[in-house]
Image: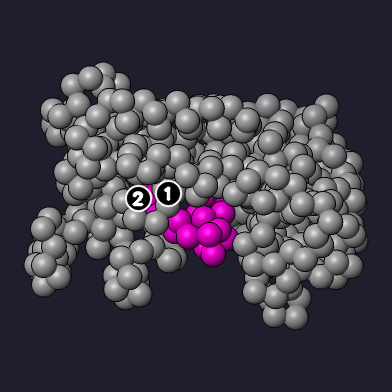
């Protein structure tokens, strides 16, 4: 990369100015998720020589025909011994166009909670399908979870094309079957790429074995998919995390409210309202570690100061006067249960929503989802580990919320068992 190209990637203050894409991988056991990520890292020159030498040695010791790139992400000894992914593995890499954070999530049904955790912040999901097996129940389950978590972009990678002689007919069958199923789901953008993660076809470099495929490679999709409009830039939400009072001579009267913009755009001089008090004021300044700015938008972390002295503390929310979230104490959520101990109907739990803490009671179970058949089970109140259900919650104080479909930041929350301090439920507000 030339000096001119390098300079273009930095902003006026000298900070690396590149978009960050978070993506997750999902697929059935042995569909090749870890191999695909290893191939992405290897072909994009994102691994060190000593790492390559180490996995080469392990591959030779095991008698593998090819270098086992899956070893780059299968970090747990149990994963390497079984050749499967158990925990969520996060990997970081960058190309000249973008930065990436990968969440390599397990495909087994007993690790649904791990997939939900890894996918909750993703802009894009890669769903792998074995070209030999086609769309199976686990493929549908992963697509449903991607839809439930409102992941805006899905890339279906039809893997192991080398094992079906790079057949266009087999690829088209998978594409047709997945499109039929995904039509029932709320997935906005679905793309398909035929690949061989083992050999590298259409992962980073275009395949010479599939000249019938004229679409972009997987890496080209990752580098160019438009994610600027994935955030909600209409409904302005700023949950206050911390009140900044430096108490120094230079900033003796400074009082700022620090947090991350969860939605919309905040501009200097605009009138805003503070919840729950309802008091209004105007934005005096928007400060960052690099100096003041004129406007802030998701997912920027900033400190906002107001022209008036208002009693604001952690858990309060700064919003626009004419665009406010609902304040509710009773509402429905879709919950993925994360704990070995089953959910207690009528049980009391701590709740964390943005920066606001509250307590709640589980009032009702509307239904439990069978995510293999996409059917609702309405007479089963036993919600256990990895189950997904629609429940009704009653909180001790009003929660300022949007639906998860409208805003993933203000539409999500977690439930915590106060006795063990374990996070037991990941919730999406209906």
Across and down, in percent, residue 261 comes to 62, 41
- Horizontal side of 327 relative to 30 (left or right) equals right
Queried whether the magenta region covers residue 298, the answer comes back as: no
Dot label at residue 156:
none
Residue at the spot 82% in from the left edge and 48% down from the top edge: 332
Q: Is residue 8 visible?
A: no
Dot label at residue 27:
1
Residue at the spot 24% in from the left edge and 29% down from the top edge: 167
- Dot 1 falls on a residue whose secondary structure is strand
Residue at the spot 40% in from the left edge and 39% down from the top edge: 134
Q: Quadrant of residue 132?
A: top left
- Horizontal side of 133 relative to 382 (left or right) equals left
Dot label at residue 31:
2
Across and down, in percent, residue 193 comes to 33, 31
- Horizontal side of 19 relative to 237 (left or right) equals left
Compared to residue 334, the image places residue 421 above or below, namely: below
Outermost residue, bottom side: 419
Label pair 2/1, CB-CB below 8 angstroms: yes
Quarter of the image containing the C terminus?
Answer: top right
- The span shown in magenta is 98-121
Across and down, in percent, residue 273 comes to 82, 37
Calculate the distance from the C-alpha at mark 2 to the C-alpha at mark 1.
6 Å
Across and down, in percent, residue 39 comes to 22, 47
Q: Badge 2 local density, few (<14 within 10 Å), some, or many (20+)?
A: many
Residue at the spot 33% in from the left edge and 70% down from the top edge: 82
């Amino acid at each position: 990369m030339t000096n001119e190209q390098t300079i273009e990637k930095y902003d006026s203050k000298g900070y690396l100015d590149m978009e960050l894409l978070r993506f997750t991988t999902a697929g059935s056991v042995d569909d090749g998720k870890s191999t695909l990520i290893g191939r992405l890292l290897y072909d994009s020159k994102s691994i060190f020589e000593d790492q390559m030498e180490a996995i080469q040695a392990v591959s030779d010791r095991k008698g593998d025909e090819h270098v086992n790139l899956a070893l780059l992400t299968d970090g747990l000894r149990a994963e390497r011994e079984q050749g499967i992914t158990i925990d969520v593995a996060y990997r970081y890499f960058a190309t000249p166009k973008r930065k990436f954070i990968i969440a390599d999530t397990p495909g087994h049904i007993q690790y649904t909670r791990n997939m939900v955790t890894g996918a909750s912040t993703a802009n894009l999901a890669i769903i792998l399908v074995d070209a030999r097996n086609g769309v199976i129940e686990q493929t549908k389950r992963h697509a449903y979870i991607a839809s439930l978590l409102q992941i805006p972009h899905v890339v279906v990678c039809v893997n192991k094309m080398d094992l079906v002689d790079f057949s266009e007919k087999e690829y088209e069958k998978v594409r047709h079957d997945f499109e039929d199923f995904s039509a029932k789901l709320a997935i906005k953008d679905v793309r398909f790429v035929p690949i061989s993660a083992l050999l590298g076809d259409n992962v980073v470099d275009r395949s010479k074995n599939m000249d019938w495929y004229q679409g972009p490679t997987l890496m080209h999709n990752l580098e160019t998919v438009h994610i600027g409009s994935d955030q909600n830039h209409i409904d302005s939400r700023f949950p206050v995390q911390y009140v900044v009072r430096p108490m120094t001579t230079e900033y003796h009267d400074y009082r700022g409210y620090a947090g991350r913009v969860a939605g919309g755009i905040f501009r200097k001089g605009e009138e805003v309202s503070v919840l729950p008090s309802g008091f209004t004021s105007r934005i005096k300044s928007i400060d960052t570690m690099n100096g003041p700015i004129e406007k802030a938008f998701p997912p920027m972390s900033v400190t906002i100061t107001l022209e008036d002295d208002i009693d604001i503390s952690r858990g309060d929310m700064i919003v626009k006067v004419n665009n406010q979230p609902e304040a509710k104490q009773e509402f429905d959520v879709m919950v993925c249960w994360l704990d070995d101990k089953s959910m207690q109907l009528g049980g009391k739990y701590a709740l964390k929503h943005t920066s606001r803490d509250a307590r709640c009671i589980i009032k009702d179970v509307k239904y439990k989802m069978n995510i293999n058949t996409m059917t609702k089970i309405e007479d089963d109140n036993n919600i256990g580990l990895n189950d997904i259900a629609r429940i009704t919650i009653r909180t001790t104080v009003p929660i300022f919320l949007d639906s998860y479909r409208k805003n993933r930041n203000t539409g999500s929350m977690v439930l915590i068992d106060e006795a063990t301090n374990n996070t037991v439920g990941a919730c999406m507000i209906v």
